[in-house]
Structures are given as C-alpha cells and as structure tokens.
Image (spheres, helix red, strand yellow):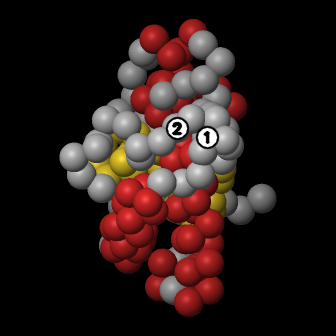
C-alpha cells in the first residue's frame, strides 16, 4: 500500500458542537483536492480521538498536520504549533495527545517522526447536541485558508 507524503489528521466528536472542527476541516480539504493537483497526494484521516494505533499512520510521511478544536485559542481564529514527541500524562490513557502519538511512533519505529504541526481551531460551544457555533464557522474558514497555504508549500 502506498501512502501519501502528506497526512492531515482531524479528530473530534460531531455530536459536541464545535468539537467537530477537525473533521469538518478535512471535509473541506477533501472537496478542494480535485482542483489542486499542485498539493500532491494527501491522505485525510479522521477519528473521535487520537489513539496509540495512530502512530503507525505516520509511516512514510514527509509531513503531518494534526487538526483539532480548542477552547484555548479563543482570542484568535486558530493557532499553529510544531509538535515534538513527548511522553505526557495522556500516554497512559486511552486517548493520546499529538505529542504522545509522536512519542509512541519514536518508541515503536526507533526513529524520529516526520515533521508535524498542530492546527488548533478556536471553538466556543462543546456541549452534547449543540450545533456548530457562528464563531467556530468563521474560524473554520480562516483555518481552511491557512491549510490551503500550508498544502501549497513544498514538503520537507
């Protein structure tokens, strides 16, 4: 099986309002892929949460973008940060952080993971059954524009 050099991994729960921002961004990117062959091959992966098994999805990648909703970026539409492997408190739970996934990759593969970034999209409403908020909808569009620019950059 051939893997694309670029992986975008979005996670969140669509039943919890703005928590769906990660998977929603991937839906938007998927709709744009046919019109942007210059982005090259891109794999899109969604789930409710990051798990140990997701470390294997990093194999063969040149770059990875993790995408999640965040209540901590409320003063900006989104935040982007580099992600480095780290054994954190999530390592011993069912759900992992992106840093925890990278740590597992390093432990299992005995080599550094590919360059990874986290795109945290600001959300406001995370209650069960709530719809996507107006603010999160606007933030999603801003984050999509950033993602398109990121995909247009050379890999590596």
Residue drawn at x 24%, y 52% as measured from the top left: 76
Tell me the tag on residue 16. Answer: 1
Q: Is residue 128 above or below residue 11?
A: above
Q: Which residue is at the front of the view, 39 or 140?
A: 140
Packing grade of label 2 (10 A; few <14, some 14-19, many >=20) is many
The answer to whether residue 147 is seen in the rendering is no
Please say if the residues under marks 2 and 1 sit with CB atoms less than 8 Å apart.
Answer: yes
Taking the image as shown, residue 88 lies to the left or right of residue 149, namely right
Residue drawn at x 37%, y 37% as measured from the top left: 71
Residue drawn at x 43%, y 16% as measured from the top left: 87
Q: Which residue is at the front of the view, 103 or 88?
A: 88
**Location of residue 54 in the rendering, given as x and y in whole percent from the top left corner:** 64, 37
Q: Is residue 26 above or below residue 128?
A: below
Image quadrant where one finds the N terminus: bottom right
The kind of secondary structure element at disc 1 is loop
The kind of secondary structure element at disc 2 is loop
Q: Which residue is at the front of the view, 83 or 138?
A: 138
């Amino acid at each position: 099986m051939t893997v694309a050099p670029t992986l975008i991994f979005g996670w969140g729960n669509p039943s919890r309002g703005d928590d769906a921002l990660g998977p929603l961004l991937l839906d938007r990117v998927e709709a744009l892929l046919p019109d942007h062959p210059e982005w090259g091959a891109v794999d899109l992966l969604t789930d409710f949460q990051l798990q140990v098994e997701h470390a294997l999805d990093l194999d063969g990648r040149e770059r990875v973008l993790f995408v999640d909703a965040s209540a901590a970026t409320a003063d900006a539409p989104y935040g982007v940060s580099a992600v480095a492997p780290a054994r954190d408190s999530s390592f011993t739970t069912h759900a992992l952080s992106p840093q925890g996934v990278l740590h597992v990759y390093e432990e299992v593969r005995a080599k550094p993971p590919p360059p990874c970034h986290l795109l945290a999209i600001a959300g406001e409403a995370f209650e069960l059954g709530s719809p996507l908020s107006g603010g999160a909808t606007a933030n999603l569009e801003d984050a999509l524009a950033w993602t398109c620019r990121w995909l247009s950059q050379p890999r590596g």
